[in-house]
Amino acid sequence: METKLTICQHNAGRLSVMVVHSQPSNCVCFGCRNFYYITMLRDPVSRYLSEWKHVQRGATWKTALHMCDGRSPTQDELPTCYSGDDWSGVTLKDFMNCPSNLANNRQVRMLADLSLVGCYNLSSMNESQRNDILLSSAMSNLKNMAFYGLTEFQRKTQYLFERTFSLRFISAFTQINSTRAANVDLSEAVRRRIEELNFLDVQLYEYAKDLFLQRFQYTRQREHQEVRLKRREERRWLREQREQGRPWPSKHKGRVFEKETENNLPTTTEDYTSQVVRCDEQRFQSANSGSTRAPQNTRLFSANRVTRVLFGAADIRRNEHGGKDEERTV
């Protein structure tokens, strides 16, 4: 799964976003385009349980070549966890007991440069050194990506995506917490075991969450500063017009003023019934015609369309007809 090269491109004006189902080092660029790399992370325990449920329903990655440094791993380097066509009906205990299960620390492995540790050759260095290098590489690649989001913070992810790429979604992201993983009844001992198996992913997720919330807070502060600066400039302009003996205008030479207060600022919270940052078309209402339109430099996209950019390559969808699961990209 993690080394199968899959490229998904979304063009929106001058925006090209690439979501890859591969380590970043395996990606190639066609046509000399400049891409933004983005990814989504998930709570390691929930993600692990979700993959277990996915495999339990019959999903496999038999066609994945796991290419690294120009070759696939040998059977000794990457032994299979099951015999037969798939691992259908596997219990959680058996799933956890397979030492070569690629579900373990999958997020770190997907983001790290495996060539730094000899790919799948576990004898190239000791385990502690290998883990340190993988985690450091994953953190570095994550930090340097144009954008990343967290599945547990859908609204904040939407807000940061919009501010990062100067795009607006027509509708708000929806947080769905009632997942198959959420419905698994875990004992504390089993949860600790999953965290132990995914200890690198746990560290990566804590790092990612801390950085994500810092970016969110910083972006919100900048937005408030921009709004205050805009109001200050508008008041100065209006004062100059009044000093020149002109009537107090609501518009001048096509310029429409927005009467906003701090309380009218859209908010983004984890209360999913509250309002979120979205494109308010009434902001662009024409004073002359009473019509409503968005300025040309504001690009509107449906949530379904652009959500596929965020989640498409990382999302594993089911084949409704055959009952099997398959990997799909946008």
Image (tube, helix red, strand yellow):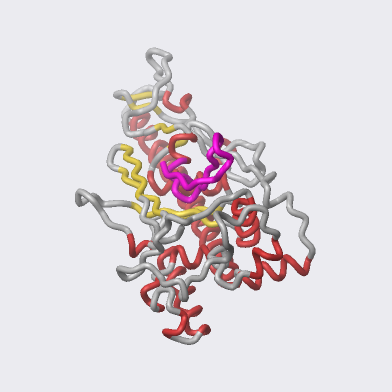
Relative height, residue 240 to residue 31 (above, below): above
* Residue that protrudes farthest toward the bottom in the picture: 126
Name the residue furthest left: 32
In the rendered image, residue 245, in percent from the top left (x then y), is placed at 34, 25
| Residue closest to the eye, 185 or 296 | 185
- The magenta stretch spans residue 187: no
Q: Position of residue 90 (x, y in %)?
A: 67, 58
x, y percent for residue 236: 38, 39
Which residues are drawn in magenta?
A: 308-330
- Is residue 215 shown to the viewer in this render? yes
Q: Position of residue 323 (x, y in %)?
A: 58, 40
Q: Is residue 265 visible?
A: no
Front-most of 169 and 298? Answer: 169
**Residue shown at the point (58%, 63%) measured from the top left:** 82
> In the displayed structure, does residue 268 sit left or right of residue 163?
right
Q: Say whether residue 319 is magenta.
A: yes
